[in-house]
Amino acid sequence: MSSVSRVRADQPKPSKVRGREPKPIDPNQLLYSRAQVCTMLGGVHPATVARLEDAGKLRAVRLSPEKENCRVYYRREDVLALIDGLNPA
């Protein structure tokens, strides 16, 4: 094993969303960021959450929809309903 691969293996993995760690998940929060939804769904990739949104399985709330790169959030009820649908009792 080369020294380069050992150095890379020892470094922590960056967050999947813009290199930042997602905020801690507060169960009383009304809106969740895409990074938080990724965590709640078991660490899925942000593109998976975007595909769920495109498929109509998860509704997005855009705080500045007129901007091209606006922040996307998801309602707590919608995320929990999706999780319940994925894990039937």
Image (cartoon, helix red, strand yellow):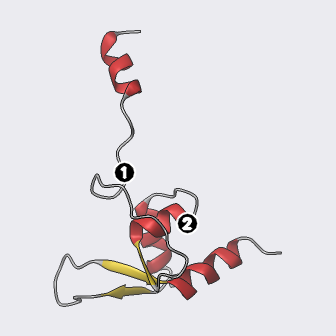
Distance between the Cα atoms at labels 2 and 1?
14 Å
Between 28 and 80, the residue placed more toward the observer is: 28
Q: Is residue 57 visible?
A: no
The amino acid at mark 1 is Ser
Q: Does residue 47 sit above or below 72 in this rendering?
A: above
Q: Which mark is residue 40?
A: 2
Image position, residue 27 (x, y; %): 55, 77
Q: Residue at x 52, y 82 (%)?
A: 28
Q: Position of residue 66 (x, y in %)?
A: 17, 90
Circle 1 Cα neighbour tier, 10 Å, few/some/many (<14 / 14–19 / ≥20): few
Q: Amino acid at mark 2?
A: Met
Q: Residue at x 45, y 58 (%)?
A: 45
On the rendered image, what quadrant is the N terminus found in? top left
The residue identified by callout 1 is: 15
| Residue drawn at 48 percent across, 64 percent down | 38
Tell me if residue 13 comes above or below residue 23 in the rendering.
Answer: above
* Mark found first going from the N terminus, 2 or 1: 1
